[in-house]
Structures are given as C-alpha cells and as structure tokens.
Image (cartoon, rainbow, N blue to C red):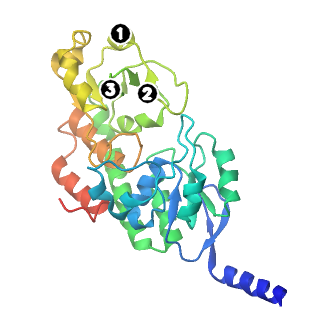
Amino acid sequence: MKIVLFLMMLIFSFANAKTITDGYGRVVTIPDKVTKIYAASPPLTMSLVAFDPTLVAALNSPFKPDQKPYVGTAASKPVAGGFFGQGNTPNYEVLAAAKPDVILMWQKAPGSEDQLKKFMALNIPVLMIHNESIDDLASQFELLGKITGNTKRAHELITYTKETLGLVRSLQGKINTRKKIRYYFAEGVDGMSSECEGSFHLEPFKYAGAKNALNCRMSSNYGMEKMSLETVILADPDVIIAMESAFASSIKADPKWRTLRAVKSGHILSVPNLPFNYITRPPSFMRLLGIRWLIHSFYPDVLQGSLDDETKRFQKLFFPKFKP
C-alpha cells in the first residue's frame, strides 16, 4: 500500500511540473504553477519586481519608505538577504519559511557555487541567470515569462529594453563625433570611492559615450574602489557624477575640491534615485532610463524628446501599480 501511495505521489508530482532551460543551459524541473520566487541578488530581485511584485517570496534588503509605493506587495515580504559581495549570505531559516517555488541566482555572484549547493539542499529548484550586461535584461524577462506563463508581460518589458538599447546604439555614430566627456563617478558619502575600467557598474556611461577620467584597476567585482584626493585632482574630470546628493551639494563649498575643472564650471550631477538608482547599486533595469539621463546630461541635443515624458512612460510600464 505504501509503495502504491508513493508511486501515486510521484506521478502527481511529475504531472504538476515542467522543465525549464536556464541561462546556462541547465535543464531544471520546476512546479507547473509558480507563484513565489526568491532572487538571491538585488539586480535579479529588481527584475522580478518589475515583472510582477506579487511573485516576490523574500527580499535581499528592505525597501525604503519612498520606494514602497512603487513595489506594491513586495514591500511587505520577509528579508532573507542574499549574496552580492562583502560576505553577504542569505538567512536560510527565513528563506525556508518563505517557501519559494523557484530560486533565481546570478552565476557570477561571489561564492555562487557554494551557495548553489546550499540552495539545492533546501529542495527548491534553482535557475541560473546571466546578469553581466544591460543586454541580459531581455533574457531575464523572457525566462520569467516562461517560468510564470505570463509571456505578455515579458514581451512588454523585452520590447522596451530592446527599443531603448537599439535607439542608444543608433546614436553612437553621432555621439562619437563629439568630444568625449571625461567623468569622475563619485560614490560614497565622501565621494572618495569609484569604479575602474572593467566594472559593470560603469556600463551606462559606455552607452552614453563618456570616458572614465580615472586610470585604475579593479581589485574585486564589487567595485567602490577607494580613491585618494590626489588621484581625482590629477584626473581632473570634465564632470562629476555623484551617487550621493549630499556630496554633490557640499562639494562646491569644499576647498579641497575647488581646483577641479568640474567644480569650477559647476558640472556636478547627482544621480536620480527615485524609486531606485538610475546607474547602479543595484545595477538594475533602471539603467535603461539612466542611459537616457546621461546622454541628455552630456550631449543635450543628441537624444530627441523630453526626458520627463520618457520618465513617465518608463514608470507607467515598469511600475504600473504606482499612482503619482
């Protein structure tokens, strides 16, 4: 009798399952109906929120008060953490209690091989996803469409992604005729951290046709390399792009920075961050809007149309539940 019952349960299990090929060619069996997904790193969680916030099973970190109106029910989900550099690891007890149907992982995240084994020990199917480039957004949305069956939503987001990247690529010839803007990307409250060539955090700047004023090497994939004031002064950028608005506001009055041409000319920009940062931390789908913002900032006559109008269109698509 027990054998018969076991076989019946096995047959039922297979009857309510389907196979998915993930971004790395792994064939994974997942539930036929997926209603809860946990993404193990912030960029993937952001893609999931854009696709459908009701699917979020657990968060990597809590949302800020001004972000919550944009993310709907995802704001109330438990925080399980994740792995995304600097020794971060998930809380497996919280994750097990959240009971996701599927886990999404970025294969190149620090410690991903060890984490994959731990996730699989929870008997939850794990799908590996590419997240090395803005172009990978399309494949992320496509996979979410296959997992959930909501191919209509996937098509909407893929269409906008390809439209934006196609438009930006079509402008490269025009941008290349202009003098390249040399920028310093100031991270941290003191502006003394930045990114070196090879960092995927700088990808929006490349699309915008700008050049990093720093000549440095990455020490890790996490980025935020510490800089000395002397290094920044020697680089003498045309423009400073600040991640922290407080730093952008204070730099003009700081005598240590006054010799920089960007400060003298007032070319100091603060990266928009509502509801999420346009450039990075995390490097999410917001970069699609961030590229447009950078081009408008660096070469105002290159990209036609109003950035305000584009922002409204973007928010309507990616945050359909938000009411301004």
Give the mark nearest the N terminus, 3 or 1.
Answer: 3
Instruction: Assign a secondary structure to mark 2.
Output: loop
Residue 280 seen from this side: yes
Residue name at image x 63 percent, y 55 percent: 24
Residue 151 pos. (x, y %): 44, 72
Around disc 3, counting alpha carbons within 10 Å, would you say few (fewer than 14), some (14 to 19), or many (20 or more)? some
Instruction: Assign a secondary structure to mark 1.
Output: helix
Label disc, if present, on residue 189 of the rendered structure: 3
Residue 102 pos. (x, y %): 57, 64
**Screen quadrant of the N terminus:** bottom right
Q: Amino acid at mark 2?
A: Glu
> Are discs 2 and 3 less than 8 Å apart at CB?
no
> Would you place residue 316 above or below residue 279 in this image?
below
Residue 27 pos. (x, y %): 67, 64
Around disc 2, counting alpha carbons within 10 Å, would you say few (fewer than 14), some (14 to 19), or many (20 or more)? many
> In the figure, residue 253 lies in which quadrant?
top left
How far separated are the C-alphas under marks 3 and 1? 21 Å
Instruction: Assign a secondary structure to mark 3.
Output: loop
Query: Could you tell me how many numbered marks the image carries?
Result: 3
Q: Amino acid at mark 1?
A: Leu
> Would you place residue 279 above or below residue 121 in this image?
above
How far separated are the C-alphas under marks 1 and 2? 16 Å
Q: Amino acid at mark 3?
A: Val
Give the mark nearest the N terminus, 2 or 3.
Answer: 3
> Would you place residue 44 above or below residue 254 in this image?
below
**Screen quadrant of the C terminus:** bottom left
Label disc, if present, on residue 195 of the rendered structure: 2
Seen from the viewer's position, the closer of residues 60 and 78 is 78
Residue name at image x 39 percent, y 69 percent: 153
Residue labelled with disc 1: 234
